[in-house]
Amino acid sequence: MPISQLAIIIPVYNPPKEWAAHLLQQYNCFLQKSNETDVQLVIINDGSTNTHFTNEINSVITQISGTVILHNEQNRGKGYALRKGVDSVQALYYLVTDVDLPYTTDSMIAVYNTLKDMKIDIAAGNRNEEYYNQVQGFRRSLSLLLRSFIKKQLQLVADDTQCGLKGFNETGKYMFLQTTINRYLYDLEFMLKASHDISIRLQSVPVFLRNGIVLRSLPLKTLIQKSGNFLKIFLYRNKL
């Protein structure tokens, strides 16, 4: 398989209607502003069941040449889907993000340029107070509490582990593929492994949400899964 300059990896699970049109708009905006032409888009359908998914994915394939589409018959979780997508292609650099490309184009370019220009292995998006002003209720409180705990107790180089925009080179890819959590907090596991490997060059990059992005509330099932995965990570940390 040919090696591309950049691969953008996006997991998809029961996205809202017209998700493909929004993705195409933001993807093309990234290409125009970054002046990067050798980009491969990888979409992982993580067991979507909504009826409009097939028609919309076909529009992406039609408009973006070389798009890689992978399918999980059942929902396996974001961590599993991203590892599958990252492992499916070869590139000099990789960006992983969400289906609505919620962060600004400039944020995506900043993460990419940090990898390319600063010779960084892993570039992790870092959200500031402006982000939390756009997040309401329990999700905001939980995110801030988790971030505070990570900063004080785990002492990671990049304390904003939950940011949905990250990038890495081939060295970072190898480490990403060593993660084992399939669902929530897979990214905390990734950052923990990277922070405790002195050979890894890890850099935080300020990122910002696009205007109009609405973040969904977290269901109880998600919180239970987060709790179990957090315990797994905490036990792993104590073994280091």
Image (cartoon, helix red, strand yellow):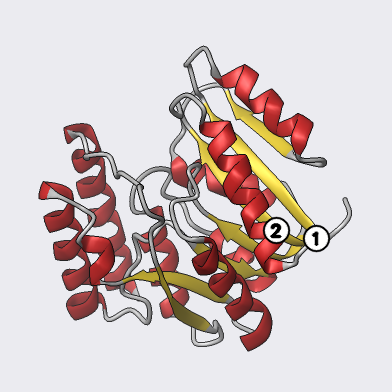
> What residue sits 22% from the left and 33% below the top?
221
In-front residue for pair 228/169 = 169
Q: Which SS class for mark 2?
A: helix
Specify whether 149 is left or right of 28.
left
Q: Which SS class for mark 1?
A: loop
Residue type, mark 2 in image: Leu
Crowd around label 2: few <14 · some 14–19 · many ≥20 (10 Å): some
Mark 2 vs mark 1, CA separation in Å: 7 Å
Which of disc 1 and disc 2 is earlier in sequence?
2
Q: Which residue is mark 2?
A: 31
In-front residue for pair 56/163 = 56
Question: Taking 99 as reference, is 70 above or below it?
Answer: above
Q: Which residue is mark 1?
A: 37
In-front residue for pair 51/25 = 25
Q: Are marks 2 and 1 in contact (CB under 8 Å)?
A: yes
Tell me where residue 110 appears, x and y as whole percent: 55, 74
The reply to whether residue 101 is visible in this rendering is yes
